[in-house]
């Protein structure tokens, strides 16, 4: 239906899908920079692997579905998915895990549902959930920080290539997991403040080192909001939901529950808040809906993270909420011009 | 000037491109040797031709009489001879021909006798008639007959009369120049409209990117010692949409289901007000208008052009550059590409833009909707354009109505910002015209059904009557036979079997027959009445349309039905443009 005879004849020049996606990628850079500083350039290798896998999967599926490759391969959406996967997966994950996850996201979660704009579930989160269910051990091995940097890049490369394994490096867990496990093992004798103060996996206000990575995501997210690429509703709702639950429990039993601040800067909270629950395709579209979506996902994420069996709950929370999007959207339609006082 | 302004949500700020065409004052376009005056230049009834081929006409002479109340007259733009009354390509996206009076100018440009009137000395009804017969319509582009908008609602006091000089479409400067040069006439025209509506206040809204126009209007208001407020409103497209301007100046939001007079406000474009003043105070009907000629031309400028001037002659005045590829009529946001330069300037022509590939590059390829919501943020009517788009695509037209597709003013803000470059407005027009088409079909089907039932009833009745007649005749014959037999028995002779009934028979049978027929007819009539009542209470459409919406639909339908492109989906024009509310 597009041709010259279609008004408006003026279009906003800076507006295109590619531009939107490029800005999302740019917003990830502060977090990536902190990541590199924390763990070395290996994360860039993982990003590259994911990107290549995503583009390959995209090219393949576009071919199968007879869609114009030139148009869609360059729209940047597959790269966003790829980067989110690389950042959400453990940094020392073997290369094939990243490839499998990315291909699953692109081929199944995106294209089998109809491609760009059609997928009801967030592809990166589908990949994360699928992999953590299928390869729970690999997905839960996070490098113990402080040790990783002692590895050279080539050693790191060998690890992700599956040629070497350094148990000392790989035995770590995420700070969230560490806390949960320690509390379980301690059986009531250990309390959160002591743990946080004594274990070296914890830093100033969250996981050691990770707190800066997540701060980077926060920075990028705020920039996206300032550029009006994302609205404030979903991130704020998400942060509010998660903090509310964390705060209530923390105030109730500070010995047993970590502070909201810890939870905010740990795990996938901020990546999720600014880059996952803001995904326009699989998220809600109305302002009220975005708030509800974010808030509920925040509550769920906290619940799964603290009481569930997985190290983090963002992915499952988001997927569950993705299911509810049509319903939330339907019941949160904003009143229109001139009809605000009716009904 | 210290009025509190309200905000409307959404809107966009495209580059304005207005500067080139405001350098020169309004020029007087030469009268072409041949003019093509379409009879239908307004929303509503198509005027009837009142002249004949070969007839001599004077400038300003009525050549098309208003057809009904919602219609407006058409006049000869100059003196000359009627060459033909024939179908000619129209200034319309479809380019389908419409009935047009072709006038060969005699070069004398001789006026008919004009009779100026003072509107205060006439009954308001009479003033409205004069406006109708002078062909005064909304010149912002909507061309709705103005007199039909000049009646206040009975139950609601008329608070504000809004005069629209916002002119928010890029490129367009005809209202700007009109206000700069003819401010006093505009103010005087506003007084006429204020009196007709009994409005308490007059607010003249002008976008703040036109300081000269604001100053000129303020000066005129001061000179004429009236208490009208000239208000500079923030520049943001579509601030010149009637509903947006009303919102900004008064805080009132007029939904599609209501007339603005029901909220005590009415809005007219400055050019409309100007022509109304000329019509009354000078007795001059609408035979010309100010048109911006700009874009890819060497001499961008505003011209006062006679209606009926072929666009080719008009465009030549601007000296289009060599790489001009096409022309837009109206602004780039809501206008359309002119199908042929043979089409004439009409009342709806506010702007002609010469286009080039550099000025209007073709739209990038359409991508799938990523539900980013940019369109919803930009929509001044706070709709969810992407939902409307999904439903239109899926041909789920009931849902589009639930999501208020008829509140969409087709301003194009959503398409303007869409990162996927989806021609959203196009989809909405398509959905709207499909809905109208279905309504029409449904109405036609209902009518056919009614006709069918009526005929059935009549057949039944006739059959019954016939049977009755036969029975009577048979009875009469038997009686006769008996009588004859008796007679024959008495006289010893056979009665001929085919003997016509005695003259007394029909007379005897007739009253009975009539009584039956009357009874049946009464039943049929009662059935008809019931059906009519049912039709009256039942919504025209089974979808959830309010009565007002239906009214609106009917009105727009009328204007589409009247428009020549009715059969050319989906690229239908909807010329609801800045300045003119779109309701009857
Ligand atoms: S702006 Fe375009 S891509 Fe974004 S939601 Fe609207 S229609 Fe979809
Ligand atoms: S064209 Fe309709 S839907 Fe789009 S912005 Fe304008 S009013 Fe809203």
Image (spheres, coloured by chain):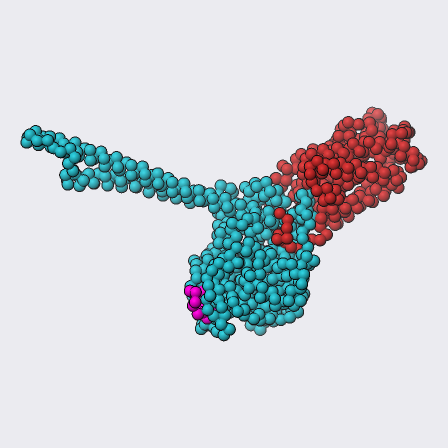
Main secondary structure of the magenta stretch: loop
Chain A: give its colour: red
Q: Which residues are magenta?
A: B51-63
Q: Residue furthest left?
A: B491
- Judge by depth and name the residue closer to the eye, B574 or A211: B574
Expressed as whole percent of the image width and height from the top left, the position of residue A207 reads 85, 36
Expressed as whole percent of the image width and height from the top left, the position of residue B438 reads 50, 44
**Measured along the vertical axis of the image, is residue B583 above or below residue B116?**
above
Where, by quadrant of the figure, is residue B481 drawn?
Answer: top left
Quadrant position of the C terminus of chain A in the picture: top right
Expressed as whole percent of the image width and height from the top left, the position of residue A147 reads 92, 34
Residue at the spot 18% in from the left edge and 40% down from the top edge:
B506
Position of residue B515 in the picture relative to residue A85 (left or right) = left
- Is residue B437 visible in the rendered structure shown here? yes
Q: How many marks?
A: 0
Residue at the spot 48% in from the left edge and 61% down from the top edge:
B100
**Measured along the vertical axis of the image, is residue A18 above or below residue B200?**
above
- Judge by depth and name the residue closer to the eye, A150 or A103: A103
């Amino acid at each position: 239906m597009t041709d010259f005879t279609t008004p408006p004849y003026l279009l906003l020049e800076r507006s295109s899908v590619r531009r939107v996606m490029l800005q999302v990628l740019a917003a990830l850079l502060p977090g990536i920079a902190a990541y590199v500083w924390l763990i070395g350039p290996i994360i860039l290798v993982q990003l590259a692997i994911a990107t290549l896998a995503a583009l390959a999967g995209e090219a393949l599926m576009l071919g199968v579905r007879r869609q114009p490759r030139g148009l869609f391969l360059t729209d940047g959406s597959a790269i966003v998915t790829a980067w989110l996967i690389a950042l959400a997966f453990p940094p020392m994950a073997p290369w094939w895990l990243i490839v499998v996850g990315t291909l699953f996201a692109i081929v199944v979660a995106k294209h089998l549902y109809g491609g760009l704009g059609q997928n009801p579930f967030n592809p990166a989160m589908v990949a994360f959930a699928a992999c953590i269910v299928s390869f729970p051990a690999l997905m839960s091995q996070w490098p113990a920080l402080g040790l990783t940097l002692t590895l050279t890049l080539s050693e790191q490369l060998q690890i992700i290539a599956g040629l070497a394994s350094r148990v000392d490096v790989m035995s770590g867990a995420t700070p969230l997991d560490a806390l949960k496990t320690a509390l379980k093992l301690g059986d009531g004798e250990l309390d959160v403040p002591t743990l946080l103060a004594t274990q070296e996996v914890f830093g100033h206000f969250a996981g050691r080192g990770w707190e800066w990575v997540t701060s980077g995501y926060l920075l990028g997210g705020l920039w996206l909001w300032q550029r009006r690429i994302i609205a404030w509703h979903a991130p704020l709702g998400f942060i509010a939901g998660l903090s509310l639950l964390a705060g209530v429990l923390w105030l109730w039993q500070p010995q047993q529950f970590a502070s909201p601040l810890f939870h905010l800067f740990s795990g996938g909270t901020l990546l999720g808040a600014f880059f996952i629950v803001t995904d326009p395709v699989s998220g809600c579209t109305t302002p009220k809906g975005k708030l509800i979506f974010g808030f509920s996902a925040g509550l769920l994420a906290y619940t799964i993270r603290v009481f569930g069996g997985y190290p983090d709950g963002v992915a499952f929370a988001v997927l569950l909420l993705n299911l509810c999007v049509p319903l939330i959207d339907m019941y949160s339609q904003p009143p229109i011009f001139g009809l605000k006082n009716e009904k | 000037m210290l009025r509190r302004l309200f905000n409307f949500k959404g809107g966009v700020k495209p580059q304005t491109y207005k500067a080139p065409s405001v350098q020169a004052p309004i020029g007087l376009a030469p009268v072409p040797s041949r003019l093509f005056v379409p009879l239908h230049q307004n929303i509503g009834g198509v005027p009837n031709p009142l002249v004949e081929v070969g007839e001599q006409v004077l400038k300003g002479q009525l050549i098309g009489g208003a057809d009904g109340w919602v219609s407006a007259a058409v006049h000869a733009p100059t003196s000359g001879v009627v060459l033909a009354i024939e179908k000619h390509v129209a200034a319309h996206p479809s380019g389908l021909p419409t009935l047009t009076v072709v006038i060969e100018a005699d070069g004398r440009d001789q006026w008919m006798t004009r009779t100026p009137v003072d509107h205060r000395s006439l009954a308001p009804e009479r003033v409205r008639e004069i406006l109708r017969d002078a062909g005064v319509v909304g010149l912002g582009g909507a061309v709705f007959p103005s007199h039909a908008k000049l009646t206040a609602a009975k139950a609601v006091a008329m608070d504000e009369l809004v005069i629209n000089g916002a002119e928010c479409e890029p490129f367009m400067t005809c209202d700007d120049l009109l206000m700069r040069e003819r401010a006093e006439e505009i103010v005087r025209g506003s007084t006429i409209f204020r009196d007709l509506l009994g409005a308490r206040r007059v607010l003249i809204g002008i976008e703040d990117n036109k300081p000269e126009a604001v100053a000129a209007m303020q000066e005129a208001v001061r000179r004429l010692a009236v208490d009208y407020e000239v208000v500079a409103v923030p520049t943001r497209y579509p601030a010149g949409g009637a509903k947006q301007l009303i919102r900004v100046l008064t805080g009132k939001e007029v939904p599609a289901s209501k007339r603005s007079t029901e909220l005590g406000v009415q809005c007219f474009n400055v050019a409309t007000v100007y022509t109304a003043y000329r019509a009354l105070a000078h007795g001059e009907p609408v035979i010309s208008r100010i048109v911006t000629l700009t874009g890819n031309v060497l001499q961008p400028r505003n011209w006062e052009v006679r209606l009926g001037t072929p666009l080719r002659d008009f465009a030549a005045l601007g000296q289009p550059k060599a790489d001009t590829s096409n022309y837009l009529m109206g602004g780039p946001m809501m206008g359309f590409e002119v199908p042929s330069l043979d089409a004439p300037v009409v009342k709806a022509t506010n702007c002609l833009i010469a286009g080039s590939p550099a000025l209007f590059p073709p739209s990038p390829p359409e991508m799938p909707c990523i539900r980013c919501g940019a369109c919803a943020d930009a929509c001044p009517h706070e709709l969810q354009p992407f939902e409307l788009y999904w439903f239109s695509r899926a041909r789920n037209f009931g849902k589009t109505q639930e999501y208020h597709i008829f509140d969409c003013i087709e301003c194009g803000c959503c398409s303007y910002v869409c990162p996927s470059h989806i021609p959203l407005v196009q989809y909405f027009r398509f959905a709207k015209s499909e809905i109208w088409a279905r309504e029409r079909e449904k109405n036609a089907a209902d009518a056919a059904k009614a006709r069918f039932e009526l005929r059935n009833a009549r057949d039944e009745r006739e059959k019954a009557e016939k049977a009755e007649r036969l029975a009577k005749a048979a009875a009469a014959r038997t009686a006769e036979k008996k009588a004859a037999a008796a007679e024959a028995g008495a006289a010893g002779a056979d009665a001929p079997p085919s003997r016509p009934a005695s003259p007394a028979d029909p007379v005897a049978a007739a009253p009975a027959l009539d009584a039956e027929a009357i009874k049946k007819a009464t039943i049929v009539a009662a059935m008809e009445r019931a059906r009519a009542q049912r039709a009256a209470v039942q919504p025209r459409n089974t979808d959830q349309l309010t009565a007002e919406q239906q009214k609106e639909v009917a009105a727009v339908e009328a204007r589409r039905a009247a428009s020549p492109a009715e059969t050319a989906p989906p690229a239908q024009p909807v010329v609801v443009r800045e300045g003119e509310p779109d309701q009857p």
